[in-house]
Image (spheres, rainbow, N blue to C red):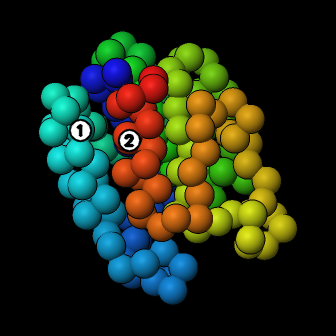
């Protein structure tokens, strides 16, 4: 069981609850983070959360995770899903298993959103189930990674 999980959220996810609620719902990122931390605490684990709108900050946070004893990463890369080889390389470079999460079903959206630079190297992929996807990803990380 992973005892320390890094919950990473990429660009624009700080706008959860405000941005396109018909797609992303009304819950805020703080709601998501609080639920993830509570879920982990209930089984004696820890979730550390980080969000940035900047690719380099996300990469630096992934690099730091290795020396902090992070055993699993749950990541919603946001729009970087479809563009960032550098973020993919950071995840590969630290060799920490990760679960890719998307609130919406990226495969039912615009063609450019259907390509992920992460799915083929992720331990798991959860999309299209709203913010519940975070709970499923944390549960998978706690039990399987």
State the residue in front, 45 or 56: 45
In this picture, residue 20 sits left or right of residue 43: right
Residue placed farthest to the front in the image?
A: 143
Instruction: State whether residue 130 is above or below residue 21.
Output: above
In the image, residue 20 above or below residue 86 = below
The quarter of the displayed image where residue 35 is located: bottom left
Percent across and percent down for residue 37 are: 22, 45
Q: CB of mark 1 within 8 Å of CB of mark 2?
A: yes
> What residue do we see at 46% from left, 83% from top?
21
Q: Is the residue 132 above or below the residue 40 in the image?
A: below
* Residue drawn where x is 51% and y is 58% of the image: 11
Q: Residues within 10 Å of mark 1 (few under 14, many from 20)?
A: many
Report the front residue among 112 and 120: 120
Q: Which residue is denoted by mark 1 in the rendering? A: 40
Q: Quadrant of the C terminus?
A: top left
Q: How many marks?
A: 2
Could you tell which of marks 1 and 2 lies nearer the N-terminus?
1
Q: Position of residue 51 (x, y in %)?
A: 39, 50
Residue at the (84%, 68%) spot, across then down: 111
Q: Is residue 4 left or right of residue 12?
A: left
Residue 72 position in % (x across, y down): 43, 27
Q: Is residue 86 visible?
A: no
């Amino acid at each position: 069981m992973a005892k320390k999980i890094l919950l990473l959220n990429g660009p624009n996810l700080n706008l959860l609850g405000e941005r396109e609620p018909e797609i992303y719902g009304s819950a805020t990122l703080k709601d998501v983070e609080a639920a993830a931390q509570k879920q982990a605490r209930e089984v004696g684990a820890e979730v550390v959360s980080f969000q940035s709108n900047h690719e380099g900050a996300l990469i630096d946070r992934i690099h730091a995770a290795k020396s902090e004893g992070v055993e699993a990463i749950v990541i919603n890369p946001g729009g970087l899903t479809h563009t960032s080889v550098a973020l993919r390389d950071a995840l590969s470079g630290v060799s920490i298993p990760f679960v890719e999460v998307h609130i919406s079903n990226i495969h039912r959206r615009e063609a450019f959103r259907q390509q992920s630079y992460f799915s083929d190297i992720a331990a798991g992929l959860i999309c299209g189930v709203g913010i519940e996807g975070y709970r499923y990803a944390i549960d998978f990380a706690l039990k399987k990674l």
